[in-house]
């Protein structure tokens, strides 16, 4: 099974009116005004997956600061997951720590969404260090919801979406939520390399990493390094579509064996999703 675990979908009305929404959402404005930015509807996503022989895609709306907008994109995701149940797995978004968060998690779970994210710690002004004091942990455990969290490297050139969120804050968030599968986007902003540390390898047992936008940042030798570290089974294929198509990632996987490619491009995520009840277990 091939799975793209990092796809953004946008309701047609939001695509039409994005400039109005951007006036009130600084992080959305920052990303939407970049030359690389693209929007995609669920129909476009399904067409893209099918054209590349992918079985499923994990889709979610933009994580706004405004909970009303989060509900709006969650409504669209729920609708599209029902329309394309074989192709799409829906994640929910919200402002973590908001007073209506628990209610929205319950609503979205009942509506068919089976994960959380992609959450933007700095873009949504989240207090990562204190989220364990909210109902997020309890709800995620109760509904078996993995959390997809944005992370980026703190060195190198600046680009739209690159934040100054401390890797230490992400580490602390993980330590407070070890019962929950956490998927760190964009190779975890380099946190994946710290799995060489015995202490972190133990604490990060339930942490996974997606490849989204990795081709912008890393040489394809990254997979050799990850293999050597011994965490290739924790890497999930994610494109950040529509920012990048599946085809852009294929050359970067060239140094992997056939079996390793199959793991990264779907089997690793499939194992977690079966464990969480998102996918039915298959022999």
Image (cartoon, helix red, strand yellow):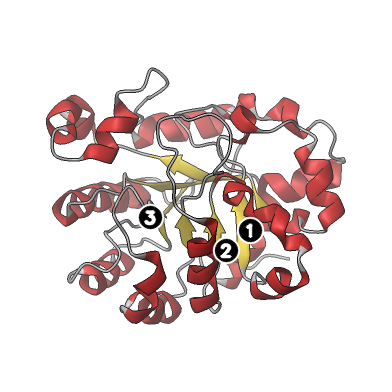
Image location of residue 86, percent across then percent down: 48, 49
Image quarter of the C terminus = bottom right
Q: CA distance from mark 1 to mark 2?
A: 5 Å
Residue 72 x %, y %: 19, 49
Circle 1: is it few (<14), some (14-19), or many (20+) Cα within 10 Å?
Answer: many
What residue would you read off at disc 1? 270
Spatial CA distance of label 3 from label 1 is 26 Å
Dot 2 or dot 3: first in sequence order is 3
Looking at the image, which residue is at 55% across and 55% down?
184
Contact? badges 1 and 2 (CB < 8 Å)? yes
Q: Residues within 10 Å of mark 2 (few under 14, many from 20)?
A: many
- Residue 190 x, y percent position in the rendering: 64, 48
Mark 2 highlights which residue? 273
Residue where numbered disc 3 is placed: 121
Q: Is residue 277 visible?
A: no
Helix, strand or loop under label 2? helix
Query: Tag 1, which secondary structure?
Result: helix
């Amino acid at each position: 099974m091939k799975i793209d675990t990092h796809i953004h979908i946008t309701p047609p009305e939001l695509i039409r009116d994005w400039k109005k929404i951007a006036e009130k959402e600084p992080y959305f404005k920052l990303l939407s005004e970049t030359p690389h930015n693209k929007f995609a509807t669920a129909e476009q996503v399904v067409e893209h997956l099918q054209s590349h022989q992918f079985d499923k895609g994990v889709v979610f709306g933009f994580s706004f600061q405004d909970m009303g907008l989060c509900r709006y994109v969650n409504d669209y995701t729920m609708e599209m997951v029902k329309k394309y149940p074989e192709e799409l797995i829906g994640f929910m978004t919200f402002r973590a720590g908001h007073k209506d968060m628990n209610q929205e998690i319950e609503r979205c779970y009942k509506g068919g969404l089976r994960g959380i994210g992609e959450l933007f710690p700095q873009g949504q002004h989240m207090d990562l260090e204190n989220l364990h004091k909210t109902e997020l942990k309890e709800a995620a455990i109760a509904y078996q919801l993995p959390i997809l969290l944005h992370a980026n490297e703190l060195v190198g050139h600046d680009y739209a979406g690159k934040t100054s969120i401390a890797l230490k804050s992400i580490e602390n968030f993980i330590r407070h939520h070890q019962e929950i599968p956490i998927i760190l986007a964009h190779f975890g902003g380099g946190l994946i390399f710290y799995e060489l540390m015995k202490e972190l390898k133990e604490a990060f047992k339930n942490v996974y990493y997606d490849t989204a936008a990795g081709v912008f940042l890393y040489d394809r030798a990254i997979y050799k390094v990850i293999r050597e570290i011994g965490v290739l089974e924790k890497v999930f294929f994610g494109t950040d579509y529509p920012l990048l198509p599946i085809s852009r990632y294929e050359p970067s996987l060239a140094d992997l064996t056939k079996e390793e490619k199959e793991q990264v491009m779907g089997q690793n995520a499939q194992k977690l999703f079966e464990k969480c009840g998102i996918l039915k277990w298959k022999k």
